[in-house]
Image: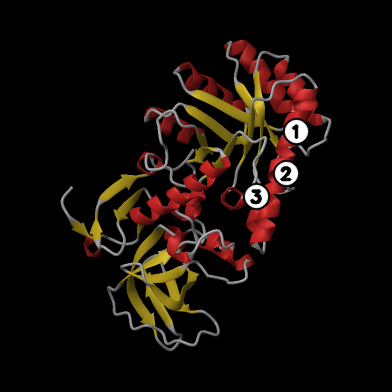
Amino acid sequence: MPTMKLSLLETPCLILDEAKLERNVARMRGHLDKLGMRLRLHVKTAKSIDVARRVLRSPDDPITVSTLKEAEYFFSHGLRDILYAVGLTPNKLDHVTQLRSRGAQLSVILDNIEAARSVAAHARTAKDRIPVLIEIDCDGHRSGIVPGDPLLLAVGRTLAESGCELRGVMTHAGASYNQDTVEGIRAMAVRERDAVVHSANALRAAGLPCQVVSVGSTPTASYAEDLTGVTDVRAGVFVFFDLVMAGLNVCAVDDIAASVLASVVGHQRDKGWIIVDAGWMAMSRDRGTAKQKIDQGYGMVCDARGKLYPDLIMADANQEHGILALRPGARVTLPDLPIGTLVRILPNHACATGAQHSAYQVVRGESDEIRATWPRISGW
């Protein structure tokens, strides 16, 4: 495409630093390689085949999706080994079997007898041995069967005796996002591993198959030290990272690859405000850092090349307006940013901010040249 500069873009728009992306991927790949672990990339963060191709080593690599639309999209680009990692409901079963009939190696998850019976009945009718993983609750964060609950074997038998393929177990250590220390994340990684390995062993002891033992979250994937008994790791936010991850010491702020480009449109000098044309519609309403030691508002503010302004955050947001201000207690002066000045705002949650945009404008390092435009999908 013709050379384009950041200054020619209409704002707000989503910027992706390809150099940081590559560095983040190499870091995670290197860590998992040392542990002997296969990465099952969670594509819900990027929702882009261009990003996925810079993470995956082969079209045969497995991926995780959070929507069947993602499954359709990535399958259309040649990726076949797909885990749909959201509890399954009957109104999605026709879509699952339709994808599988076209060659997708699509597997699903569930954590209750009702869903198991529904999948089993559909599998018999469709003559499709739908592969199923049972979700395990390792931390009380969300869904899943608690290790040791007799429900695990009941669900396993319902699946195995019905014509479905009981493929294994999986879990997600969502509580890792609530830890205060790296030691807490490491302990959560052990807890995550132990929960699925214990559950896998319980299924096997009962004579039930359990080929896959899957764990996944970017914090635990980053700090796990021993994944004996696990077969694959699902993670996705690591490709971009974000301020929540930085607040957990999973990455540095300088590792954050995605940002929102915005323009200064006004000032309220008596209030110490700089107004930009990126509000919560561009950044999302995610305020994940508000629960952390340092509240970053709606995001930290950089100049157009990605250099941070000290203590400048998006302190508040309306639909299309962002309010930049110094964080409380700051000992610096508000930067002088004339009307039209471009800034880049680092997001709290890369997945949520990305979901507000239809494409990435790709740059490399401090260059203001747009190297490519990578489309991304949204919706269900």
At label 2, the amino acid type is Cys
At label 3, the amino acid type is Gly
Residue at screen point 64% across, 12% down: 124
- The residue that label 2 is drawn on is 138
Where residue 171 appears, as percent x and y from the top left, is: 66, 39
Q: What element carries label 2?
A: loop
Seen as rendered, the residue at the extreme front is 34
Disc 3 residue crowd, few under 14, some 14–19, many 20+, Cα 10 Å = many
Q: Tell me: residue 347, above or below residue 68.
A: below
Q: Which of marks 1 and 3 is nearer the N terminus?
A: 3
Residue 16 visible, this orientation: no
Location of residue 265 by image quarter: bottom left
State the mark number for residue 199: 1
- The residue that label 3 is drawn on is 174
Distance CA(mark 1)–CA(mark 3): 18 Å
Distance CA(mark 1)–CA(mark 2): 10 Å
Where residue 235 appears, as percent x and y from the top left, is: 54, 44
Where residue 28 appears, as percent x and y from the top left, is: 49, 48
Q: Which of marks 2 and 3 is nearer the N terminus?
A: 2
Q: Is mark 3 on a helix, strand or loop?
A: helix
Disc 2 residue crowd, few under 14, some 14–19, many 20+, Cα 10 Å = many
Residue 354 visible, this orientation: yes
Distance CA(mark 2)–CA(mark 3): 9 Å
Q: Tell me: residue 17, above or below residue 167.
A: below
State the mark number for residue 31: none
Q: Earlier in the sequence, mark 1 or mark 2?
A: 2
Q: What element carries label 1?
A: helix
State the colouring used for the structure image.
secondary structure
